[in-house]
Image (cartoon, grey):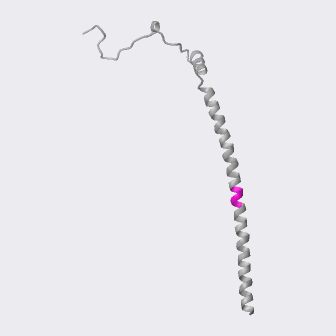
Amino acid sequence: MTRFNFVLLVALLVSAFCLVNVRYESRRVYMALSKAQSQAARLEADYDQLLAQKRAQVAPGRVQQIAAQQLKMRPANPAVTEYVQAAGAPARGQP
């Protein structure tokens, strides 16, 4: 009978250690999940902010303003259009 009780005691201790290990692992995994969810929320907020900044940067009025001020560009019109011919190509009206 004592052998049987000893075997049961060993089985009880092994199951108790397994239970403690499983609880520890579940807590660790839960904390990792919580950290990943908070990071995902932070990244999503950053992404939304970057999209808003991108929309502001490519607004047509802003692009036209930068083109006029920094690049000294102006709208094209037929009065200032210059036609360039490729080298070796005959000019119009010439044989």
Across and down, in percent, residue 40 comes to 66, 46
Reply yes or no: does residue 45 show up in magenta. no
Question: Above or below — where is 56 with respect to 25?
Answer: above
Across and down, in percent, residue 95 comes to 24, 10
Indicate the quadrant containing the N terminus: top left, top right, bottom left or bottom right: bottom right
Give the extent of the magenta segment: 28-32
Question: Above or below — where is 92 with respect to 48?
Answer: above
61 left or right of 34?
left
Name the residue rendered at 65%, 36% in the picture. Answer: 48
19 left or right of 78?
right
The prevailing secondary structure element of the residues shown in magenta is helix
Question: Above or below — where is 6 with respect to 63?
Answer: below
Q: Is residue 82 or residue 57 the one in the foreground?
A: 57
Question: Above or below — where is 53 with respect to 89?
Answer: below
Q: Is residue 36 or residue 93 the one in the foreground?
A: 36
Reply yes or no: does residue 29 show up in magenta. yes
Name the residue rendered at 64%, 30% in the picture. Answer: 53
Q: Determine which quarter of the picture holds residue 61.
A: top right
Across and down, in percent, residue 38 comes to 70, 48
Q: How many marks?
A: 0
Name the residue rendered at 72%, 74% in the picture. Answer: 17
Toward the bottom, the furthest residue is 1
Q: Is residue 30 or residue 95 the one in the foreground?
A: 30
Q: Is residue 91 or residue 7 the one in the foreground?
A: 7
Toward the top, the furthest residue is 79
Q: Determine which quarter of the picture holds residue 90.
A: top left
